[in-house]
Image: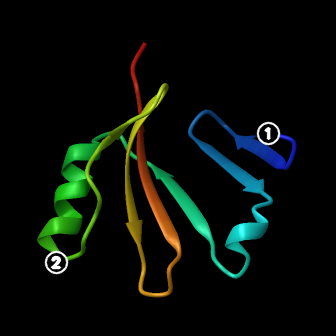
């Protein structure tokens, strides 16, 4: 992506910034976890409303919006 900048900090941490003019005033954060199913269940147990688990090319993920409309993505990389 032309508007994506990415930094890696060690093997387990990274930061991505990208331009999305349509979402100005909103944010997205992606958190990488080792057990997506358990983390999704935590949202459900705390009466939040996560989406269904989605399958991407390299990860499984769940989307959740906070009360201000910011997107929180919980992702679990697929094992090779």
Q: Nearer the viewer, residue 8 or 50?
A: 50
Residue 4 picture location, percent across and down: 80, 47
User: Up-down: is 67 above or below 18?
Assistant: below
Quadrant assignment, res 44: bottom left
Residue 13 picture location, percent across and down: 61, 45
Q: Residue furthest bottom?
A: 68
The residue labelled by disc 2 is 47
Q: Residue at x 56, y 39 (%)?
A: 12
Marks 2 and 1: which is nearer the front? 1
Q: Residue furthest left?
A: 45
The residue labelled by disc 1 is 1
**Numbered label attached to residue 46:** none
Q: Residue at x 70, y 43 (%)?
A: 9
User: Up-down: is 33 above or below 27?
Assistant: above
Residue 30 picture location, percent across and down: 53, 55
Residue 16 picture location, percent across and down: 71, 51
Q: Nearer the viewer, residue 45 or 10?
A: 45
The reply to whether dot 2 and dot 1 touch (C-beta < 8 Å) is no
């Amino acid at each position: 992506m032309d508007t994506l900048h990415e930094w890696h900090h060690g093997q387990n941490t990274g930061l991505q910034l990208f331009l999305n003019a349509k979402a100005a005033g909103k944010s997205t954060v992606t958190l990488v976890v080792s057990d997506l199913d358990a983390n999704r269940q935590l949202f459900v147990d705390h009466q939040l409303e996560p989406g269904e688990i989605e399958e991407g090319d390299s990860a499984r993920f769940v989307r959740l919006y906070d009360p201000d409309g910011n997107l929180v993505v919980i992702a679990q990389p697929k094992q090779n």
